[in-house]
Amino acid sequence: MTEPLLEVENVDITYRMDSEDVHAVTNASFEIGANEYFGLVGESGCGKSTLAKSVIKGLDSNGEVSAGTIRYKGREIQDLSEKEYNKEIRWKEISVIPQAAMNSLNPLAKLSDQAIEIANVHTDWSAEKSVDRLKELFDIVGLPESRVTDYPHQFSGGMKQRAIIAMSLLLNPSLIIADEPTTALDVIMQDQFLKHIDGLRDERDLALLLITHDIAVVFETCDSMAVMHGGQIAEKGTTKEIFSTPRHPYTILLQQSFPDARHPDRELEVIEGSPPALREEVDYCTFASRCPWAEQECQESLPPIESMNGNDSHAVSCFRSDEMESLASEHLNTIGRPQANAIENEGYEDDD
Amino acid sequence: MTTNNETEPILELRNVEKHFEQSTNIAETLRQTFFGEGAQEPVRAVDGVNLELAENQVHGIIGESGCGKSTLLLTLMGEHEPTGGEILYNGQPISEFDKADWKALRRKIQVIFQDPFNTMNPHFTVRETLKEPFKIHGIETDEEELLDMLETVRLTPAEEYIDRRESQLSGGEKQRVSIARALILEPDVVLADEPVSMLDVSTQASILKLLSELTEEYDVAMFYVSHDLSTVSYVCDEVNVMYLGRIVESAPTRKILSDPKHPYTQALINAIPVPDPFHDRSWTELDGTPGDPQNLPSGCRFKDRCPERMDVCDQQPAFEVHDEETTHQVACHLYDEQPVGDSPIGVNKTGVSES
């Protein structure tokens, strides 16, 4: 991998509340390379959206990056002013597909006018150029070019989604951040959306940061991923590594709690309890209170994130990660999964 | 659980229809009355649904948004009056029920809603929430019963939970309280409207487990409405797939997951993301969204999106049994045994769909 596109390094994010602070993210680090599709997974409240918002300067006014750096193309962006960020990065370098994407178009303006406005704020493009560009993108996402002058209400739900994808690509960004883009959708609509997102890989140089609670979507769409719990990155690696050799207890249990339509009879794992409220400085593993294998040490200090088996990409934040394979063996064996060294066997398919 | 076809169904839907008239203002109504202009086509949200729910059975009703599954549920709850067909409770048509019958029925049919975050009165403690059904039906209760119920839905220690308010519960705990509230009057039937779709995955698993255990333990039958086929195997005995107001396929859960017949069911199953990066699933071939229930095409309602479309699809496919043993039924011309041209003997021959 060449120089990463986005580097998040040891980031802490704190929300100031009336009486106390909430330490929403603690010591989070990950990297996204150019053209890489990266998934950030975790349950609600784990800090995944907060982390993504910090990258786009979208934190609520009481939230701030209290430690660490966020670099985009090698440049630190966490301290940029709103104005600088707008001028140099927003839309042009990093654009966003919001949650409830279908409802995020302006209902009172034609799509072409919305594109002109965006380009007008961020570039010196002529109106003509902006509309031409939108037409090109409509073509890529499979919408008729003639419809760029429609209003959003003239589109069906699926078309709105595609229009949003087209819009996010308007100023040719290198990174798209999609925050739970499919959560409100039915399976078929979700699949149509992911199909188009996946199709973009071939069309252009684009990296994606996909935030979701749905580990299945990440496994299917992304190259690499990070799993978050209680504001900490529990484990990160390529999707194949995380799938085949998960070494953080949360990742292991999370995977097992996910229904797989191919194995309707598999027992679902239940993760008891809920993450801590994070009101004090976090100097412990936030999963310890829910972890079946936690020890004294886990409550007392923050586990460092260490790479596994000298492997560059795969890293785990757990004191017992080396023992996990035997400790969690009964949880690991319930799916007939190929081991990491059998990865070249691409023809793997389940006979369901 | 064994399927017992001999027992009388506890809840039976016969050709149930719920159409919504479109005239919304008085001018339009007057114009239609006096000038005889045709009324707008009604929205056919539920259009000829036949279902039988036997004691102890859990039936899934699966489909995309707009397929009519929620309208169907509201109709069963008595929120909507069906515009056609009949709903029978223990063999009695509920259209003939008087007020007292309805009250008794409301005790026997309980609901679990989709959104656990807005279904509890925020001023109520858990105790008050659970007492409310007793109050409504004028039944005496004691603390012991409420605590037992909380234990049953695994909110332990119950003494600690009983005084909490809505704001002191997590999403999963709220849904457990909803389940407790639904079961506390020992109903015959529970209607569950996407009970896990708003919960986190780890919580989702525990609620699914709880639901399937409790339906057995409490001898209660359930309609489980969802858009997600990946969770049905944990709860349902049978699955009915609904598309634009009609059931298009129905079969035991294992059967439908392993051998879906209708192209729509196949698409629904294929579109479920597989949690496995080694698995190469093909993206969905379906385009667009379900049509407009106000302007339904004649014949098969899925034909405009169907990858297998044939000429015969302009005729309405019959809902026929394709496997006697498992009562696997499907409404699709791909499985026509009769030669094309024979009038298919449909369950819905009222002609409403042939507009």
Image: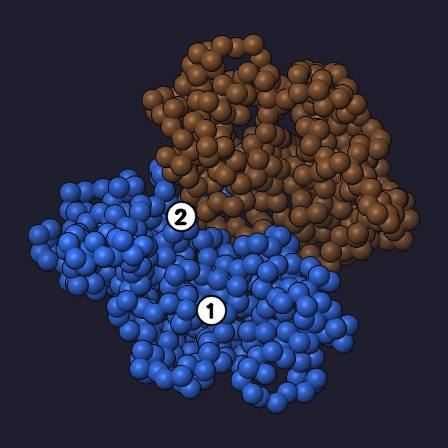
> Chain drawn brown, letter?
A
The answer to whether residue B304 of the structure is visible from this angle is yes
**Residue ID at (21%, 64%):** B347
The residue at the far left in this view is: B341
Are discs 2 and 1 located on one and the same chain?
Answer: yes
Q: Tag 2's secondary structure?
A: helix
Determine whether, in the image, residue B95 is placed left or right of residue B70.
left
Q: What amino acid is found at the position of numbered circle 1 in the picture?
A: Leu
Q: What amino acid is found at the position of numbered circle 2 in the picture?
A: Leu
Res. B155 image quadrant: bottom right
Q: Earlier in the sequence, mark 2 or mark 1?
A: 1
- Where B204 falls versus A237 (above or below)? below
The answer to whether residue A237 of the structure is visible from this angle is no
Q: Which residue is mark 1?
A: B191
Please identify which colour was used for chain B in the image.
blue
- Indicate the chain on which mark 1 is placed: B
Q: Position of residue A102 (x, y in %)?
A: 48, 38
Q: Which residue is mark 2?
A: B268
**Residue ID at (56%, 58%):** B115
